[in-house]
Amino acid sequence: MTKRSRNFLGYRFLAALFTGIAFDFTDEILATAGAYNRYPWLCVAFQPVLFAFAPIIYWATFYLTSVSQKWSAKIFYHFVPYLLILLLYFKSYVFTNADLATLSKAVVSAEHNPIDAFLVAAFFLQIAVYMYLSIRKLTKHRKSLPLFVSNLPDNDYHWLSNIMIGMCILFAVSLAEVIAGNAFLSGFFPTVYLVGFYYVGFQLVRQQDVFSFSTDQAKSLSDLVDSQSRLYSPNREVDEDPDMADLDGPYLDTVPESPALQKKKAVSDEKMSLYHQRLLTLMETEKPYMDSEITLPKLARMILLNSYQTSYLINSRFHENFYNFINRYRLEDCKRMLANPEFDHLSILDIAFESGFNSKTSFNTAFKKYTGYSPREFRERSRPAEDS
């Protein structure tokens, strides 16, 4: 199964979003061409789609940032407003002989009657609520990434953040269009929409960070992320345990995990030392950190534990999350090669890639925080003066 297919639900919702956008453009064309006056039933097909945008965006974000791809029945509840608006349109414009002149303005302009004004207000309120929920979901996911990935630049979902920013701007422009009224005919708003949707599409093409996990791995990672969320919920006092003090890595600003707050031990005390030694031996002999795509599930398989147990082991014995643990080994490897004249034939970037980093920027930032020097400064300082 390909990486992309592992997030099939997220991509289906994205496809639905762009289909809805196509319907929205079609609605504008039909309104301008006067098609609603001749075929009022078209209004039922196209205009209520606006109320499906917000939940589609949220569920696309939800599944694109979830290691688990289980279908949730709760999805249907989020589309109740769309169904209600659909029924309203169906009743008003099919079973009754409504004023055809208002059809092309429904849900686009609030100038005609209180119902139109209510629908417009409800649409933008719905957008605001769901964009907030989507951004919060994405933020939570990005904070959880250090729990199971070792390289962030290609996995931090900047492309999805940019899509959300682009959609927020487009909805703001749409609100401005409603306020401006007939300014749509000037050509300004269609141009902005066209540029905006090209931008959103370009960001979608850039995506490269969908993970591929087996069902068991996804379940284990979901438990890990959920556990972390409970530990750092706003209502929890993190000062209640002294082991919470200063557990951050020396070179990365992330929220660490703390085994001290976990009520149930993932690994018994009797086996902890055994797996601890097994992990140390693995890191020294097989050097899995040199794999730029190493993840917590991959490491867990190597020491015959599941992801949750491996995370618990790393937290309890090294007081680090997975990201800091792996990159500490990488940075020590980089320090060793930078200080050794035998590796002078390698550039600093070559050394970074050889050690498992996949981004020059992230390597330079991590190395500076870890050592206090840039890689070039460290290489120069680690060598004795030749003329001494």
Image: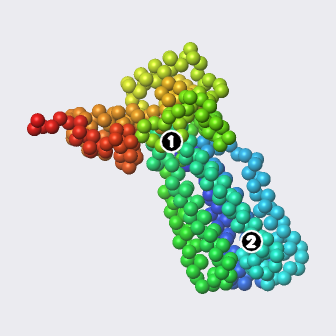
- Return the residue found at the far top: 270
Residue type pointed to by label 2: Val
Q: Quadrant of the C terminus?
A: top left
Residue 196: where, in percent of width, then height? 55, 69
Q: Quadrant of residue 99?
A: bottom right
Q: Would you name the residue on which mark 1 appears?
A: 254
* Side of 39 relative to 352 (left or right): right
| Label number found at residue 95 | none
Q: CA distance from mark 2 to mark 1?
A: 41 Å
Q: Secondary structure at mark 1?
A: loop
Q: Is residue 40 above or below residue 264?
A: below
In the rendering, at what x and y percent does residue 142 appear?
55, 47
Q: How is the image coloured?
A: rainbow
**Residue sitting at 62 percent across and 23 percent down?**
265
Quadrant of the image occupied by residue 122: bottom right
Query: Is residue 218 placed above or below 196 in the rendered structure?
Result: above
